[in-house]
């Protein structure tokens, strides 16, 4: 009887373990789907929303102030996340911040470089979306995959597979085809002062900065016993003061004459929140998804941006644009697949 009871108990324990594994697998699959949808929509909506914000009628907001406010919002969200996930009381929370940021000044100073680079990058993205249609910008900005790969080889001493180099060449070819096409949207006719070359140069510099800052950020993350939320708090503590300095240096006349929040309305608040969400969503991707899923989401975002551009901006698509876009999407799939199978994970380097 005793042996039979023990067998029954073992069977019950086994059933519980199986049910737990199934529940965890189901939960993980659900989180992957949520991450895929969220990342796709965020990637597409940022390009479309920034384009509309820079071409809509009415008072034009000062873009450098929007970049700073996005950092402020991100800091606020990360503080809440750290409080609820890493602390047990308000005093413990203050102690965590003090021990991580104040008492480790050298560690905090390490994030000065990526903080400044990200600020410049985000300001350049506004310049790019002011001069390029949303679809072209979305495709061109995928060159950050190329710059991230190059900097990972130079800084992290990683080795890329032959298929990955082929994917990067295809990526460059696709972007070149997209940039050489004659596709336009209605805003380019309404605002003839837009300069496609300026938009392209701004996007290329932003891609280079994104690649460098992402790889550098990953390097300082290695071996550090600190959560990605706390690391984002460090970034914000440094980038917000730098951002205010950049605002007043580059846009002092506009800010002093019109005010810091000139041109702000509910749409600009939405845009700021959307931009701030980018870095937080990437953190979710690092935790719950993989490179194949991220590549799939990026490709879907390109399709969504193109479709919405046709509908909202009267964007005309040429055969050359379609071919270039298809090449970019194929290169993303190829690079993500080979990287997932045989290479180290680079998700943390592709920070928005």
Image (cartoon, rainbow, N blue to C red):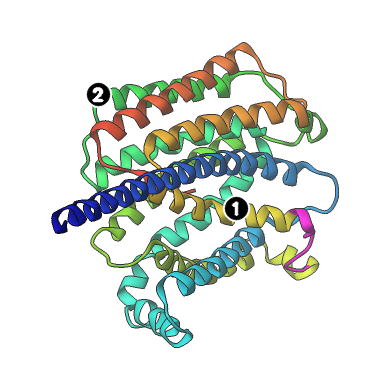
Provide the residue span drawn in magenta.
259-267
Residue 96's quadrant in the figure?
Answer: bottom left
Q: Secondary structure at mark 1?
A: helix
> Residue 136: horizontal and vertical position, in percent?
61, 29
CA neighbours of label 1 inside 10 A, class few (<14), some (14 to 19), many (20+):
many
- Nearer to us in this view, 132 or 284: 284
Q: Is residue 54 left or right of residue 200?
A: right
When the figure is inspected, residue 215 is found, relative to residue 132, above or below; the finding is below
Q: Is residue 24 magenta?
A: no
Q: Residue furthest right?
A: 58
Q: Is residue 117 left or right of residue 4?
A: right
Q: Is 32 situated above or below 295?
A: below
- Disc sitting over residue 198 in the figure: none
User: Is the magenta region chiefly helix, strand or loop?
Assistant: loop
In depth, the one of 191 and 283 nearer the eye is 283
Q: Residue at x 49, y 68 (%)?
A: 81
CB atoms of marks 1 and 2 within 8 Å: no
Which residue matches tag 1? 275
Measuring from the top left, give residue 78's x and y in whole percent.
Answer: 50, 67
* Local secondary structure at mark 2: helix
Q: CA distance from mark 1 to mark 2?
A: 34 Å
Task: For residue 179, say whether it is visible.
Answer: yes
Question: Which numbered disc flags the more N-terminal residue, 1 or 2?
Answer: 2
Vertical arrangement, residue 259 with respect to residue 210, above or below:
below
| Residue located beneath label 2 in the image | 162
Residue 323: x and y, percent?
A: 54, 14
Horizontal placement of 22 versus 224: left or right? right
Residue found 54% across the figure and 22% down from its top: 325
Residue 284's x, y, as percent? Answer: 45, 51
């Amino acid at each position: 009887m005793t042996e039979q009871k023990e067998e029954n108990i073992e069977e019950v324990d086994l059933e519980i373990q199986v049910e737990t594994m199934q529940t965890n697998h189901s939960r993980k699959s659900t989180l992957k789907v949520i991450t895929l949808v969220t990342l796709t929509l965020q990637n597409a909506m940022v390009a479309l929303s920034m384009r509309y914000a820079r071409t809509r009628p009415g008072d034009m907001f000062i873009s450098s102030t929007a970049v700073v406010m996005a950092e402020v919002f991100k800091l606020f969200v990360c503080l809440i996340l750290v409080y609820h996930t890493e602390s047990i009381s308000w005093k413990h929370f203050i102690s965590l911040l003090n021990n991580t940021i104040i008492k480790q000044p050298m560690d905090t100073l390490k994030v000065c470089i990526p903080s400044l680079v990200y600020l410049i990058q985000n300001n350049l993205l506004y310049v790019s979306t002011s001069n390029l249609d949303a679809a072209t910008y979305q495709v061109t900005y995928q060159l950050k995959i190329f710059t991230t790969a190059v900097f990972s080889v130079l800084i992290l001493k990683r080795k890329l597979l032959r298929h990955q180099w082929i994917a990067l060449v295809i990526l460059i070819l696709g972007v070149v085809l997209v940039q050489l096409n004659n596709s336009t949207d209605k805003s380019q006719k309404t605002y003839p002062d837009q300069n496609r070359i300026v938009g392209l140069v701004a996007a290329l510099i932003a891609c280079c900065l994104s690649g460098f800052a992402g790889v550098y950020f990953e390097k300082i993350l290695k071996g550090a016993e600190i959560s990605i939320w706390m690391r984002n708090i460090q970034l914000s503590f440094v980038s917000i003061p730098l951002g205010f300095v950049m605002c007043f240096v580059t846009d002092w006349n506009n800010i002093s004459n019109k005010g810091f929040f000139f041109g702000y309305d509910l749409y600009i608040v939405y845009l700021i929140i959307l931009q701030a969400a980018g870095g937080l969503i990437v953190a979710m991707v690092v935790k719950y998804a993989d490179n194949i899923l991220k590549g799939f989401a990026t490709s879907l975002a390109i399709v969504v941006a193109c479709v919405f551009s046709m509908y909202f901006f009267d964007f005309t698509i040429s055969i050359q644009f379609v071919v270039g876009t298809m090449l970019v999407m194929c290169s993303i799939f190829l690079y993500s697949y080979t990287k997932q199978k045989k290479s180290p994970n680079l998700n943390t380097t592709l920070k928005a």
